[in-house]
């Protein structure tokens, strides 16, 4: 089993998982800027592992199949469990936030199971909004958190994530971002890492 983990795309996936786990850890601690830095890098590694896998030659069918399942399971942690815990923590673990947290994890499991069976509509089109978009949007919206009262922003956050999960499973076509979009994501991740790092520095 462990031999599959040494496959280069899967090493990249594990790096993304580490970032997601760190994001979850800091979300629980209530350090939301650092948590968002972690999950943004998880998205970047998630995109990178697919790019690496497509460019590598000589991989066996078993390696490709394992990599696909491995990536999907890590996505549940990064884009299902992370936003659920982020929401719970920002809501100060109030039971009112539990239904939303459950729906986030359940929706990610449903969407990824569907994708594992049916895949893309075509090479450039998803059915429904891909899960990684949720945390990309979350990281942008959270930039405005300091300008709004905590109670009000918690409602905004709740509504935003519930709206996004509807799009995740909706029968709509959404584009698959690839190619040059990876560099756009890299720039976005670096810029927000600097911004949230600066915010964290000022908190300390």
Image (cartoon, grey):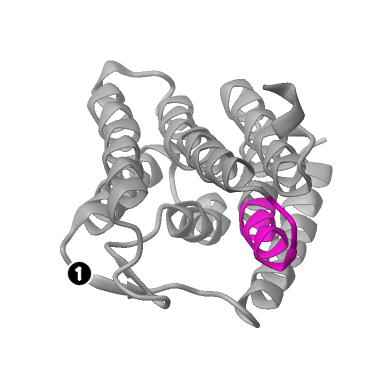
Extreme residue toward the left, this view: 171
**Image quarter of residue 172:** bottom left
Tell me which corner region of the image, top left, top right, bottom left or bottom right, holds residue 55. bottom right
Residue 121's spot in the image, x, y percent?
Answer: 29, 70
Task: Using residue 98 as the reference point, say whether residue 56 is left or right of it.
Answer: right
Percent of width and height locating residue 183: 71, 76
Query: Which residue is disc 1 drawn over?
Result: 172
Instruction: Categorize mark 1 by other alpha carbons within 10 Å: few (<14), some (14-19), many (20+).
Output: few
Taking the spot 52% from the left edge, 59% from the top edge, the residue there is: 136
Q: Quadrant of the N terminus?
A: top right
Q: Nearer the viewer, residue 127 or 25?
A: 127
Q: Which residue occupies 51% across, 74% down?
A: 177
- With respect to residue 113, does 169 lie above or below? below
Q: Residue at x 42, y 76 (%)?
A: 123
Report the residue at 64% width, 34% height from top: 23
Q: Main secondary structure of the magenta part?
A: helix
> In this image, 94 relative to 55: left or right?
left
Q: Choose between 93 and 74: the one closer to the eye.
A: 74
Q: Nearer the viewer, residue 56 or 94?
A: 56
Q: Is residue 56 magenta?
A: yes
- Position of the C terminus by quadrant: top right
In front here: 167 or 74?
74
Above or below residue 20? Residue 142 is below
Label total for image: 1
- Magenta-highlighted residues: 44-59
Residue 58 counted in the magenta span:
yes
Measured along the vertical axis of the image, is residue 3 above or below residue 201? above
Q: Point out residue 156 in the picture as x, y percentages from the top left corner.
A: 33, 49
Q: Name the secondary structure under disc 1.
A: loop
Q: Position of residue 182 (x, y in %)?
A: 66, 72
């Amino acid at each position: 089993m462990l031999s599959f983990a040494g496959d280069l795309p899967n090493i990249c996936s594990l790096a993304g998982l580490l970032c997601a786990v760190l994001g979850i850890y800091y979300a629980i601690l209530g350090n939301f800027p650092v948590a968002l830095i972690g999950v943004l890098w998880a998205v970047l590694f998630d995109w990178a592992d697919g790019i690496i896998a497509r460019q590598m030659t000589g991989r066996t069918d078993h390696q490709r199949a394992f990599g696909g399942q491995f990536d999907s399971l890590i996505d549940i942690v990064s884009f299902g469990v992370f936003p659920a815990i982020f929401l719970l923590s920002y809501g100060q673990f109030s039971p009112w936030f539990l239904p939303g947290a459950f729906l986030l994890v359940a929706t990610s499991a449903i969407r990824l199971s569907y994708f594992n069976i049916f895949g893309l509509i075509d090479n450039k089109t998803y059915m429904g909004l891909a899960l990684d978009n949720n945390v990309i949007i979350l990281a942008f919206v959270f930039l405005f958190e300091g300008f709004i009262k905590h109670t009000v922003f918690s409602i905004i956050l709740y509504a935003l994530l519930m709206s996004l999960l509807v799009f995740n499973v909706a029968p709509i076509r959404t584009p698959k971002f690839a190619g040059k979009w990876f560099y756009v994501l890299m720039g976005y991740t670096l810029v927000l890492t600097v911004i949230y790092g600066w915010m964290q520095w000022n908190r300390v």
